[in-house]
Amino acid sequence: MIKKKIIVENKLGLHARPCAMLVKTASKYRSDLLIKKDNIEVNGKSIMGVMMLAAEYKSELELIANGVDEEFMVDEISELFKSKFNEE
């Protein structure tokens, strides 16, 4: 199991397009992904779940991955956050 804290760097936060990119990326992998914000924990492969986080700019999220390819999934998702989902 891998846990990684990550900050939302794009100014518009996790709105529909970044959520879709995140879910699409996570769904490529066999591992499970949970995303935690404050005391809310959602399935990282569910667009409705990720949207429910209402993660705004500078929110801190925790990625919790578990499975055979967890490291690759967390690395690729981390890159999405670092690239600000190609919005800026």
Image (cartoon, helix red, strand yellow):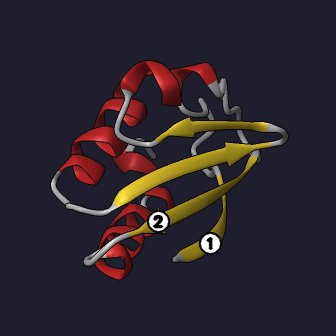
Q: In the depicted view, which residue is nearer to us: 78 or 3?
A: 3
Mark 1 vs mark 2, foreground winner is 2
Instruction: Compute the Cα span from label 1 to label 2.
Output: 9 Å
Residue 20 picture quarter: top left
Residue 29 picture quarter: bottom left
**Is 3 left or right of 81, judged from the image as shown?**
right
Say above or below: 26 vs 30.
above
At label 1, which amino acid type do we have? Answer: Lys
Q: What is the crowding at mark 1: few (fewer than 14 residues within 10 Å), some, or many (at least 20)?
A: few
For the residues labelled 1 and 2, say whether their Cβ atoms are less than 8 Å apart.
yes
**Is 67 left or right of 4, judged from the image as shown?**
left
Q: Which residue is mark 2?
A: 65
Choose the circle earlier in sequence order: 1 or 2: 1
Say above or below: 3 vs 36.
below
Q: Going 26% across and 78% down the picture, which residue do you hit?
A: 68
Say above or below: 1 vs 85.
below
**Is 2 left or right of 11, judged from the image as shown?**
left
At label 2, which amino acid type do we have? Answer: Ala
Helix, strand or loop at label 2? It is: strand
Q: Going 41% across and 32% down the picture, which residue do you hit?
A: 19
Image position, residue 43 (x, y; %): 47, 38
The residue sitting at the right extreme is: 38
Helix, strand or loop at label 1? It is: strand
Q: Going 42% across and 70% down the picture, which residue do you hit?
A: 74
Q: What is the crowding at mark 2: few (fewer than 14 residues within 10 Å), some, or many (at least 20)?
A: many
Q: Which residue is mark 1?
A: 4
Q: Is residue 15 visible?
A: no
